[in-house]
Amino acid sequence: MTTLAILGVLSSALFSGTSLLYATLGEIIGQRSGVINLGLEGTLLVSAASGFAVTSITGNPYLGTLVAVIAGGLTNMILGYLVIERGANQLASGLALMFFGYGLSAMIGKAYVGAKIEGLPRIALPGISNLPTLYSSLLSFDILVYLAVPVAILVWWMLFRTRWGLGLRATGENTDAAFSSGRNPKRIRYQSLFIGGLLAGLGAAHLSIAYTMTWAEHMTAGRGFIAIALVIFSRWNPLQAIGGALIFSGAVAFQLLLQSSGVQVSPLLLDTIPYVITLLVLIAMGGTRKQSTPAMLGRVFSGSE
Amino acid sequence: MQNSNASKTTGEPSVSLRGITKSFPGVAANDHIDLDIYGGEIHALLGENGAGKSVLMKILYGFYHADAGEILLDGKPVSIQSPHDARNLHIGMVFQGLNMIPVLNVWENIALFLPDLKPMLDYKRIEHRITEMSERYNLKVHPHKRVSEISIGEQQKVEILKLLLSDARVLILDEPTDVLAPHEVEAFFGVLDSLRKDGYAIILITHKMKDVLECADRISVLRGGRLAGTMLRDEATEEKLISLMFEKEVPGLKTKPGESRDKGAEPLLELRDVATGTQGAGSCLKNVNLKIYPGEIVGVAGVSGNGQKELCDVILGMEPSTGGKKLLYGKDLTNASIGTMRKNKVAFIPEHPMSMATVPFMTVLENMSLTKTKRYARRGGFSVDWEAVEADVEETKERLELPPVPLYRLAKTLSGGNLQRMVITREMVDNPELIIASYFTRGLDVQSTIAARQALVKAREGGAAVLLVSEDFDELFTISDRMVVLFGGEIVGEFKPEDTNIYEIGYLMTGSEVRHDTEN
Amino acid sequence: MIRKTEKNTLLQSETLRDTVVRYVLMILMVIVFFGLILLIYGINPIQSYKDIFSSTLGSAYGFSEVVVAMIPMLITALAVAIPWQVGLINVGGEGQLYIGAAFATWGALTFSSLPAYILLPLMIVLGMLGGALWSFIPAYMKAIGLVNETITALLLNSVAPKLVGFLIFGYWHSAMDTVKTANFVSAARLPTFFGTRIHLGLIIALVLLICFWFVMKYTRWGLEMRSIGGNSHAALRNGLPVKAYLIIVACIGGAIGGLAGMTQVSGFYGVLVNNFSTGTGFMGFLICWLAGGKPLGILLMSFVVAVITAGGNMLQLTQDLPYAVINILLAFTLFIVLARPSFFGRNKA
């Protein structure tokens, strides 16, 4: 295995893992407040499509990213309304949102399938740019990749070191206690879904604007569901999510490498590795997971009587 | 601990409640209650279940809104619409069963309730404040530990710290010693004493005589939603308090039970040294020994929360026993499934028919079949013989002289009383041999209540064994053949109704060790 | 004593009216929304509706195509409806579909020399076995307290098509194509009717639907299931074996999902193609929720959704309308149902 190959895997993992990490972080915030968004896939698609479309029209990838971020927040608000205001079942609402996302994103993106855009520029950190082009191009990343880990740390800090985060976690663990401390659980949940949606939008933006620089229907390819699994995998902890996203996308990248180096295992089987690993880890984590799950996840809060 | 009369009762009361009235559908929980709470005093609010103590305090804390009456703080009227308002007015409440978040740390749980919490959490500063306060009042806690890892006694200290650190001056504690081990109770009273000396007004909601006599400065007794009386500690005796707490001296016997059946030699149900749950909590059963014979009704008296639910559930099979044996006709059915118990002709009438026994969206007729689906299944389960269900209902109704139930209405449209009648009818089908009735006439109108009790009596005449858990003395005294008293998960007394009276039972229910002989 | 017929009609007329109102409203909503979307695209809605009507319901062939599309929807909706009776939510339909199809395909390929009247039932059993297996995994994991069953089911949804693709690519592919198997022998194909593509799967689906209705309404097990779904705490106290029911019913749901897969590969395609499902599993979920889990509603909504999707397909060809709007339309309808506006009447939990 040459250095080049290893670097290739690393590069690929970082690229594909970035959007996954952002999406996972967003979902962690939402779930920590007690709401599970099965429609994350839909949110990602809508954000990716809108971001791409705007980039294509204006030629400005930064604007496109901004639009994607906002689109993500707004899409999540649909779920928020159904689940928080109307008390609808979270699973069904999430899946409905998924359908909605499939449809809306396809409509938005229709005119832009196959369009070429100037994506977010890739920058090589000083030192790396001195390397031969072969290496430096592999290790040049766009700004969202560099920001991924800092953002994860920021999310961690928000959840564990701020008053807002404390209230959010309390809402997800014991909504009545949060309520009797004078907080408004409904409002907190809206906030968490919105911010979570912003992060998901960021991830989606990276996918369509920075990484693949294309748009195709259903291009997120299940990332939304993977992110949900990674939330459990990382025990609702943003820092552990970094590891989770890396492991998953690393597994994907590694498996691609295996495929191209002629390993005699079916690519499709290799494709299942990431999911199977996730499942196995979830099983292995087994009993401890119970302690980490936000106790109010999935439940409806009815307010004071 | 010495009771000090040196309460600062000169001057205005800190909190005054005037004419507080609150009703829930069908129940008058508080009826024109006047109460004065003074700073630097421990004021005990004594009373049975349903007397209205919790409701009154929850009104003070903003959890409920009073229908009428007003609240004055330091002589000035205030409006308390939510716990938020109460906390702003420096009123704090520690609920029964605590309100902690197990996965968060102690300091996080406290921080959640700090009114002046900064946007960025400053752990060091918060910890400092916790340590300071906890040293002042001997409330040692471990700020770093998760709440799930500390003892219940420590959790309660955290709850109190929450109040103190959010600048509460009026502390309401709802049944605080329920969760404490005996040695922790002593330390707890010490804490209350030092708080009192610093001028805090403390309201202690309790049903335990011992606690009241040991630490209260002033005692108010609530009964049936009304204030039965207030007195200073010096003036209080057990007798006086019990007579205020319980309504009548001697219960009138309305329906004479008739001759007790000749008890067979073998008990139908026997519990030997049965224990449940993790020891420590006041409601877990500890070493319960009980025998119930066919043809008798055993009444269980006690303040709810002292093990009644656990007793019923462990007999039914809903709660696993962590020790001891349960025998039905000598057969060891310890930890048998509920299905097995029911097959052995055990019936259960719960206190809350809608949530515990019925399916709201099914018709009454369908609900009637749910405990015995096998009995009504025909053709291997492919059809259900609804006529047989109707016939059973009819037969039971006749046998026990119960009023009819509307078979074709949806269960959720029935009133509570009708629903309970439905459940009673269902449970009595096919002559069950052991009947567990848990607060089964709660909320029923007079007619239904009489009919329900009649049904139990008739069942007994038919040879059934009945366990009747109740908080209604009329009920217990009139239809029980024997009575036991549950306190703290243990059976603390056993009597025949004719050999005892409310005072005696009252003492045992409130944990008093002293048993007084009384004149009849 | 009220006579039997009297009381039955009393109860029935109440709920029947609710149901009718609900469905009429839903269909009206769908029509109006679709019209709006068409307007946005500058397409004449009236003309479009006419076109849809004539191409779907107006011709025998069109109608038969609608029915063909309806078949898998009926079955996957049932796969969600059955567990729903005990309060379980089956999101693993996609995966169950694939694995059921795979198991059935194995049967078709391995036993291709058997006569149809043996092979087809065998394939049905295999399909159900595959689906049941795929739903047993999440159910079991939940029962022993390890993983949330929704997540497991969703992950398995993603794994299933890849697994199936692997089986095709690695073992089953035809000589010419690596993305699909050889065509099934005619003995492995569910027979079709009247020269259309409507296959026996329809009969299977209708029979299942009737069985579902019958079991839930008349049998002891239906009664017990409904009581668990209606109040599982009370069911426990009443002595019912709740845990056992939950696992068994989850597996039954999976089996039906697997059966849907079998009917698709055997009746519709006649071959196992990589990634053959177009979200059928999720569509079934949608239909079940729109129908409130009721058998008649499932029949009705499956038909409506099939018409919509056929219409969408047609408009895509003729008017260049992106098919995606169908998804938006259906999602939006489900949003409304979930939001439970008061004019809808009471909805089941």
Image (tube, coloured by chain):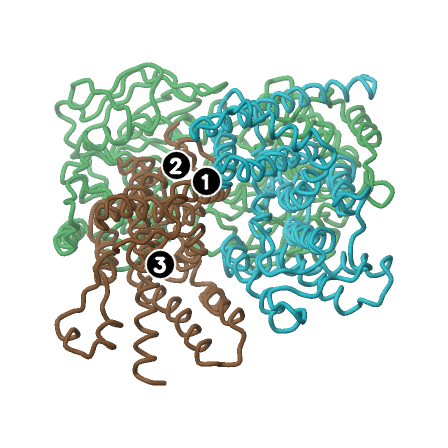
Chain colours: A brown, B green, C cyan
Q: Are marks 2 and 1 in contact (CB under 8 Å)?
A: yes
Identify residue for label 1: A100
Q: Residue furthest bottom?
A: A1
Tell me which amino acid carries mark 1: Phe
Labels 1 and 3 positioned on one and the same chain: yes
Q: Helix or strand or loop: what does disc 1 sit on?
A: helix
Ranked by sequence position, the earlier of labels 2 and 1 is 2
Please name the residue that numbered disc 2 is placed on: A78
B284 and C191: which is toward the camera = C191
Sequence order check: which comes first, mark 1 or mark 3? 3
Q: Is residue B364 above or below residue B125?
A: above
Q: Position of residue B386 (x, y in %)?
A: 81, 31
Judging by the rendered image, the residue that carries numbered circle 3 is A20
Q: Residues within 10 Å of mark 2 (few under 14, many from 20)?
A: some
For disc 1, the chain is A
Per the model, the C-alpha gap separating discs 1 and 3 is 21 Å
Q: Is residue C104 visible?
A: yes
Kind of residue at badge 2: Ile
Q: Residue at x 45, y 56 (%)?
A: A221
Q: Is residue C37 above or below residue A138?
A: above
Where is residue B144 shown, x and y percent of the image?
24, 59
Relative to A143, A83 lies left or right = right
The type of residue carrying mark 3 is: Leu
In the rendered image of this protein, does residue B115 appear above or below residue C38? Answer: below
